[in-house]
Image (spheres, rainbow, N blue to C red):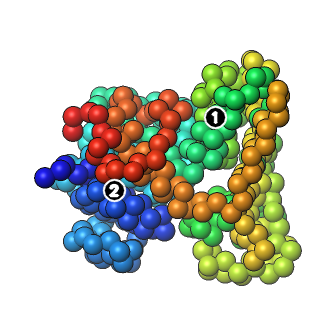
């Protein structure tokens, strides 16, 4: 009987329904699942996605370490929160247990430029137990490898400029809060925008103290520089509110966002490099109106100029497909907390995932 990759799901919200189905269809075996929501604990996984045929019951996240040691998965997938501080304890447990782990946590995509202290702690733990930790998802392709591939067909680059928009309604309450959705303008200025009205020295102090609130593009710019072999000499970040022009319903916030209140934000990161290449990246996360849709647009300026635009990407599904397709890469990778900028290029997996595993499991 062909061996199946054993998968443990951490977080049973919106993203997990795609991840679990995709993983099962590529012949993974789900060996456990946890959540912190009392309404989910005790339910069968098919409560998330009816096409999931499994006897696995969602258990309390408080029992994660015990469950990992019992089930001995080849990989754990974390689909919970967006910052490294938020998932720190979960990562520690996975690393302590020696479990390869991939997460949709946006900061984990390249956390060494926003939370290096915690990144290195997890890195040491993972190396000690010979497992691999990484972050991936939509950004792995559409903010990362897609851009580096275009760069590979460019003779000379002077600037890389990108913009991506997404509907915060698709990703749960934690992401909506991180974007200021539902805030007043005053609250947004106090709790989000004001945090970037600081000097480079002050920002570096916050980074070292694990207190810097990095926008998603902060980590993406770091990933791109790492992938392209560029040396960043300075970076800046600004977050601007996007206001509702009419009353706007939000299922995620369970409220009507009144006209004039914040429905999301634009975060712009600008980096200068030793190689005289600028990288400017903007992410726009907001509650959409009926007329709006996801859009991903990147331009590489130089010789020649190239622009690529992706309209209406199925961001949630693309995120989950990347996570599942990356599973063999995580298992095959060296131990440590390693960004996908140092992995092999992402690939479509047409066969059972275990067929792509090179390491002995």
Instruction: Kindly report the distance in space between the C-alpha atoms of the residues bearing marks 2 and 1.
Output: 27 Å
Which residue does the image show at 59% across and 39% down from the upper left?
Answer: 145
The 10 Å Cα crowd at callout 1, few under 14, some 14 to 19, many 20 or more, is few
- Write down the quadrant of residue 243 in the picture: bottom right
Please identify the quadrant where the C terminus is shown: top left
| Relative image position of residue 38 (x, y in whole percent) | 37, 74
Q: Which mark is residue 49?
A: none
Residue under numbered circle 2: 26
Q: Residue furthest top?
A: 274
Which residue does the image show at 79% across and 38% down from the upper left?
Answer: 306
| Relative image position of residue 251 (x, y in whole percent) | 62, 79
Residue under numbered circle 1: 149
In front of the other: 25 or 217: 25
Q: Is residue 309 above or below residue 261?
A: above
In front of the other: 197 or 262: 262
Say whether disc 2 or disc 1 marks the residue closer to the N-terminus: 2
Which residue does the image show at 63% across and 70% down from the upper left?
Answer: 169
Relative horizontal placement of residue 57, taking residue 175 as reference (left or right): left
């Amino acid at each position: 009987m062909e061996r199946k990759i054993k998968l443990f799901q951490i977080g049973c919200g919106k993203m997990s329904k795609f991840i679990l189905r995709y993983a099962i269809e590529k012949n993974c075996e789900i060996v456990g699942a946890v959540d912190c929501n009392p309404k989910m604990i005790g339910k069968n996984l098919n409560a998330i996605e009816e096409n999931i045929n499994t006897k696995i019951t969602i258990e309390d996240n408080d029992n994660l370490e015990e469950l990992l040691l019992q089930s001995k998965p080849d990989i754990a997938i974390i689909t919970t929160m967006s910052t490294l501080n938020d998932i720190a304890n979960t990562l520690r447990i996975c690393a302590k247990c020696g479990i390869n782990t991939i997460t949709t946590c946006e900061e984990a995509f390249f956390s060494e430029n926003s939370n290096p202290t915690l990144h290195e702690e997890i890195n040491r733990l993972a190396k000690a137990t010979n497992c691999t930790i990484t972050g991936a998802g939509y950004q792995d392709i559409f903010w990362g490898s897609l851009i580096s591939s275009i760069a590979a067909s460019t003779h000379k680059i002077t600037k890389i400029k990108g913009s991506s928009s997404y509907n915060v309604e698709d990703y749960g309450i934690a992401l909506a809060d991180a974007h200021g959705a539902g805030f007043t303008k005053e609250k947004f200025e106090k709790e989000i925008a004001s945090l970037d009205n600081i000097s480079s020295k002050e920002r570096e102090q916050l980074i070292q103290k694990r207190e810097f609130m990095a926008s998603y593009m902060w980590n993406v710019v770091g990933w791109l520089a790492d992938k392209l072999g560029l040396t960043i000499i300075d970076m800046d970040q600004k977050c601007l509110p996007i206001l509702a022009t009419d009353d706007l319903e939000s299922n995620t916030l369970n409220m009507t966002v009144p006209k004039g209140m914040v429905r999301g934000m634009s975060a712009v990161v600008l980096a200068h490099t030793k190689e005289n290449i600028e990288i400017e990246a903007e992410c726009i996360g907001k509650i959409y109106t009926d007329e709006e849709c996801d859009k991903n647009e990147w331009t590489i300026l130089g010789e020649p100029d190239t622009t690529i635009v992706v309209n209406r990407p199925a961001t949630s599904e693309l995120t989950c497909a990347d996570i599942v397709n990356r599973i063999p890469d995580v298992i095959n990778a060296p131990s440590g907390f390693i960004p996908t900028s140092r992995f092999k290029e992402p690939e479509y997996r047409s066969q059972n995932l275990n067929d792509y595993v090179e390491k002995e499991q």
